[in-house]
Amino acid sequence: MTADAPLAEFEIRSGSRRGSRLTLYANRLVHQAASALETVPLAQLAAVRVAFERDARKLGWAIALLLVALVCAAVAAPLQHWFGALGARLGAAGRSESLDALMASILAGLQATAGFLPALAALLAAGAAALGALFALGTTSLTLSFAAVERSFEVRGRSRFLLEFAETVSEQLAARVR
């Protein structure tokens, strides 16, 4: 085994560092991106951490969006009916025609706006489903700890390949200590 033969490689296909590659050599770890290259001697590496994580905030937002969608869907028909009934009762005795016309146009506008609530509810529900899917998918992150700095590499979902890469890096670190 020579210092120039790669022991393991991992291509990051998702996340903020998509398109970059981690390559492990006997004495160094190389992170190569489209516009940057970083080489870290393994002697500088203090710890390696790999974990599968889910962002609970995404689940919270998904639940909140779903609740708002349900409220919008629940109040859409009653609001339309109520605004329509109010508009129909205009023209009572003792009121001027201009006020009736103004009120009728305002109520018609509110009735039309209430008609958009089911579509808004559907969009909110779709957003909630997307956030729920991202929560369920989770991320696998590899964190490399140096003396004063940490580097983190994340990919969506459970990445068996990133776990294997981290295991190989850990084995190299352990071999250097012996």
Image (cartoon, rainbow, N blue to C red):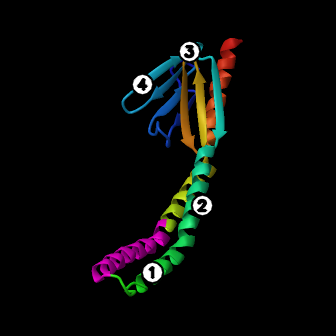
> Mark 1, residues whose alpha carbon is within 10 Å: few (<14), some, or many (≥20)?
some
Which amino acid is tagged 4? Leu
Q: Alpha carbon of mark 4 to alpha carbon of mark 3: how far?
A: 20 Å
Give the secondary structure at mark 4.
strand
Whether label 1 touches label 3, CB < 8 Å: no
Q: Which residue is mark 2?
A: 67
Q: Residue at x 57, y 71 (%)?
A: 74
Quadrant location of residue 67?
Answer: bottom right
Q: Which residue is mark 3?
A: 148
Quadrant location of residue 172?
Answer: top right
**Could you say which is closer to the camera, residue 175 or residue 54?**
54
In this view, the mark in front (4 or 3)? 3
Q: Alpha carbon of mark 2 to alpha carbon of mark 3: how far?
A: 44 Å
Residue 104 in magenta stretch: yes
Precedes in sequence: disc 1 or disc 2: 2
Q: Alpha carbon of mark 1 to alpha carbon of mark 3: how far?
A: 68 Å
Q: Alpha carbon of mark 1 to alpha carbon of mark 4: how far?
A: 68 Å
Q: Which residue is mark 4?
A: 37
